[in-house]
């Protein structure tokens, strides 16, 4: 019986630590100029056509109570630079300021329009830095001539 309690306690601690490590959940969807939406998975590349405009829909779900960070505290780094509409030298040109809308008490959505402005492979890091685990993943985009 003692062995069972030890295994149960270890399993509970392991599950609890895994839940804390993923305190934010994100889903990414890319809509191209043809209106077709596809899911973007961190760590996998998404192909883009040079000069085309895309909409990246970001769905942020808090999976813990009372997050102290606002959705606007999510940082998007493109090639290690903060992605802003005022930066016209980045390979993916942000066409407007990133704004978030609250869909429910724990779900927020941002629709981000951008232009694939330069050929190449570009990485965008999405970061939320908080004490409950946060989020840090990389989206990869490959821009080619059509």
Image (spheres, helix red, strand yellow):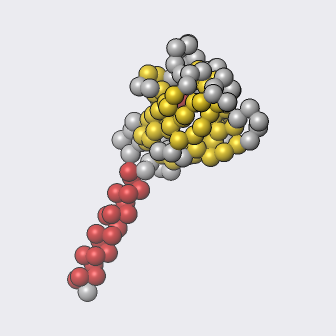
Task: Give x and y (percent) for residue 95.
Answer: 64, 20
Can you say which quadrant of the picture contains the N terminus? bottom left
Q: Nearer the viewer, residue 28 or 2?
A: 28
The quarter holding residue 111 reads top right
In the rendering, at what x and y percent does residue 24 appear? 48, 46
Task: Tell me what residue is drawn at x 23 percent, y 82 percent.
Answer: 3
In this view, the residue farthest toward the left is 2
| Label total for image | 0
Residue at 46 percent of width and 39 percent of height: 138
Where is residue 34? Give x, y as percent: 77, 36
Residue drawn 58% across the image and 17% down it? 85
Residue 69: image location, x then y, percent: 47, 35
Residue 2 relative to residue 33: left or right = left
Residue 17 visible in the displayed image: yes
The single residue placed furthest to the front in the displayed view is 146
Q: Which of 4 and 25 is in front in this view?
A: 25
Point out the residue furthest to the right here.
34
In-front residue for pair 75/61 = 75
Q: In this view, does 33 lie to the left or right of 73?
A: right
Q: Reply above or below: 31 against 16.
A: above
Question: In what quadrant of the picture does the C terminus appear?
Answer: top right
Residue at 50% over, 38% down: 139
Residue 60 is at least partly visible in this image: no
Q: Quadrant of residue 2?
A: bottom left
């Amino acid at each position: 019986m003692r062995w069972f309690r030890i295994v149960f306690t270890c399993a509970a601690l392991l599950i609890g630590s895994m839940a804390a490590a993923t305190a934010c959940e994100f889903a990414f969807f890319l809509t191209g100029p043809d209106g077709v939406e596809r899911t973007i998975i961190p760590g996998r590349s998404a192909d883009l056509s040079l000069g085309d405009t895309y909409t990246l829909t970001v769905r942020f779900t808090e999976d813990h109570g009372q997050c102290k960070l606002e959705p606007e505290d999510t940082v998007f780094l493109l090639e290690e630079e903060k992605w802003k509409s005022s930066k016209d030298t980045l390979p993916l040109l942000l066409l407007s300021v990133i704004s978030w809308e609250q869909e429910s008490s724990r779900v927020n959505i941002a629709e981000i329009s951008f232009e694939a402005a330069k050929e190449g492979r570009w990485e965008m890091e999405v970061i939320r830095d908080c004490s409950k685990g946060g989020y840090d993943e990389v989206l990869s985009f490959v821009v080619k001539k059509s």
